[in-house]
Image (spheres, coloured by chain):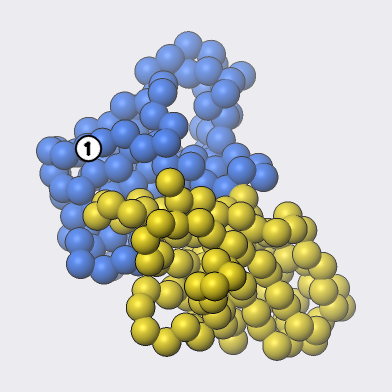
């Protein structure tokens, strides 16, 4: 049982490039979340999903897109990378009936 | 809207001393409250949570927190700090909808001196 896994661990992008951050969970959780963490700012919610085929915006969705075609996977897409997207990105999941989120190890992204 | 404020971005204690990390929240409905810990270069790990029932909540690694509705607080304590407690700590409140979204405080970095 691997829990929540994220790839890649690190990535450097040039301005304007695109990439997909991968997130997979093997706990059969319905709910999944993407957060970004900036120094001194805590974590901010980007997008979330309450089940396959259902996604919604969080607090800071601009510049990102998501899809949820399966229960296990919740990829985060950056279309035109900007320096303001330099951050650490965390994926999390939880069961519908509980309140505890389980976090992945994070992806550290730098946009230059 | 819900919000969380953590008082003090950095807290420094000596090994063996009391740890007190402060968290205040605002919520128009009974909140679900959480403390998460983040060790360097790792993801977040749940320390403890309050949902309903007993207001004094015990978590892992000897930490506990008390929900005080009158003070809108959920402070984290540990009687005796250990070097391994050095980490960043986040207080969070669950959103008022049914989506389980978490609203985090800014985080408090705990330094433990020998």
- Examine the image and state in which quarter residue A84 appears: top right
Percent position of residue A16, x then y: 48, 11
Left or right: A28 with respect to B24? left
Q: Is residue A41 visible?
A: yes
Dot 1: what SS?
strand
A52 vs A85: above or below = below
Point 40% across, 57% down: residue: B28
Percent position of residue A12, x then y: 55, 27
Task: Give the letter of the chain under mark 1.
Answer: A
Left or right: B36 with respect to B32? right
Left or right: B66 with respect to A29? right
Determine crowd level at label 1: few under 14, some 14-19, many 20+ residues with C-alpha closer than 10 A. some
Percent position of residue A62, x then y: 41, 23
B13 vs A16: above or below = below
| The N terminus of chain A: image quadrant | bottom left
Q: Can residue B38 be seen in this view?
A: no
Percent position of residue B9, x then y: 73, 55
Q: Which residue lies furthest to the front in this view?
A: B70
Point 73% across, 87% down: residue: B80
- Which residue in the structure is indicated by mark 1? A55
Q: Nearer the viewer, residue B94 or A17?
A: B94
Chain letter for the blue colouring in the rendering: A
Q: Which of B103 and B90 is in front in this view?
A: B103
Left or right: A91 with respect to B73? left
Q: Nearer the viewer, residue A56 or A22?
A: A56
| The C terminus of chain A: image quadrant | top right
Chain letter for the yellow colouring in the rendering: B
A105 vs A77: above or below = below
Point 67% across, 45% down: residue: A40
């Amino acid at each position: 049982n691997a829990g929540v896994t994220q790839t890649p661990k690190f990535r450097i992008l040039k301005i304007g490039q695109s990439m997909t951050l991968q997130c997979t969970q093997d706990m059969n959780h319905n709910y999944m979340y993407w957060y970004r963490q900036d120094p001194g700012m805590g974590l901010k919610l980007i997008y979330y999903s309450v089940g396959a085929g259902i996604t919604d915006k969080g607090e800071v969705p601009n510049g990102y897109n998501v899809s949820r075609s399966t229960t296990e996977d919740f990829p985060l897409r950056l279309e035109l990378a900007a320096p303001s997207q330099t951050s650490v990105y965390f994926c999390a999941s939880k069961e519908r009936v509980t309140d505890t989120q389980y976090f992945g190890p994070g992806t550290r992204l730098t946009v230059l | 809207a819900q919000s969380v404020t953590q008082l003090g971005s950095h807290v420094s204690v000596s090994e063996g001393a009391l740890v007190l990390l402060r968290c205040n929240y605002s919520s128009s409905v009974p909140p679900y409250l959480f403390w998460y810990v983040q060790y360097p270069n790792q993801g977040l790990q749940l320390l403890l949570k309050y949902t309903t029932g007993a207001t004094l909540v015990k978590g892992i690694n000897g930490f506990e927190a008390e929900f005080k509705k009158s003070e809108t607080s959920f402070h984290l304590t540990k009687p005796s700090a250990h070097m391994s407690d050095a980490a960043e700590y986040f207080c969070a409140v669950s959103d008022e909808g049914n989506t389980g979204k978490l609203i985090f405080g800014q985080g408090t970095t705990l330094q433990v001196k020998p």
